[in-house]
Amino acid sequence: MSLFDDLPKEPAREAGEDGTILWPEHLQYVVIEGVIGAGKTTLANMIAEQADARLVLEQFEENPFLERFYKNRPRWAFQTQLSFLASRFRQQQTLGGRDLFHKFVVADYTFDKDRIFARINLDGDELSLYETMFGIMQPTTPVPDLIVYLQATTDRLMANIAQRGRDYEKDMDRDYIDSLNKAYNHYFFHYNQSPLLIVNATNIDFVKHPEDLNELMRQIASLRHPGTTYFNPSSTGAALL
């Protein structure tokens, strides 16, 4: 189920009188979030380039258990999750460092997303140990000035995953992606730690249609609401990788 059921399309607002999209000074740390295949890394790259921001990407390729996890989730879930937890925590600790070349930071994940995966893939003593470790680490991680959550249907996510062609994702379980999608929607429906922009990303393509990116950039630049804002953009309909 989409978070956008029954919501009308909202036109993007301009950031300035001349239409120039200027990155707001108060958005020094912005995170792009979404389920596997939502397009968060692609969008983070594009926004970082336009805003001249430091880009922080999740280092999933460095997880030695990930490929084995997709082949046998129950067997490798705990090792995979702890490896991600350690990697994400280590990376988060560098975000507070001064960067002489970039004023802003754009990342393609939040530290808290780790727990969404853990609660789906772990149980019993393994989940209890994970929760203890997460509880020690989480309070020391930075809170974003804005989270942009790319919400899409499970069908769209599966199509994007198939199109990008990663070997270890070629037999991706649709039920697993669907369970993640529901868990993400639930998490962000209740999220209140920082401003949140939920974008209906099912029918947009930032790569093939620059107007989709510009529309979203204008929305971000003009966003002042401290809580959750829902954005239902004009749809052009194509693959979002």
Image: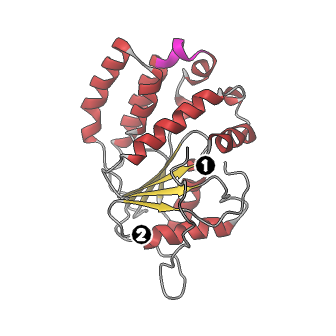
Task: Give the main secondary structure of the magenta stretch.
Answer: helix
Q: Quadrant of residue 103?
A: bottom left
- Dot 1: element: loop
Q: Is residue 54 magenta?
A: no
**Disc 2 versus disc 1: nearer the observer:** 2
Q: Is residue 203 above or below residue 13?
A: above
**Which residue is more in the foreground, 229 or 24?**
229
Name the N-terminal-most of marks 2 and 1.
Answer: 1
Q: Quadrant of residue 69?
A: top right
The amino acid type of the residue labelled 1 equals Gly
Q: Which residue is mark 2?
A: 223
Q: Is residue 142 left or right of residue 209?
A: left
**Which residue is more in the foreground, 86 or 230?**
230
Question: How dense is the environment of label 2, judged by Cα within 10 Å: few (below 14), some, or many (20 and up)?
Answer: some
Q: Is residue 1 above or below residue 84?
A: below
The residue segment tinted magenta is 72-77
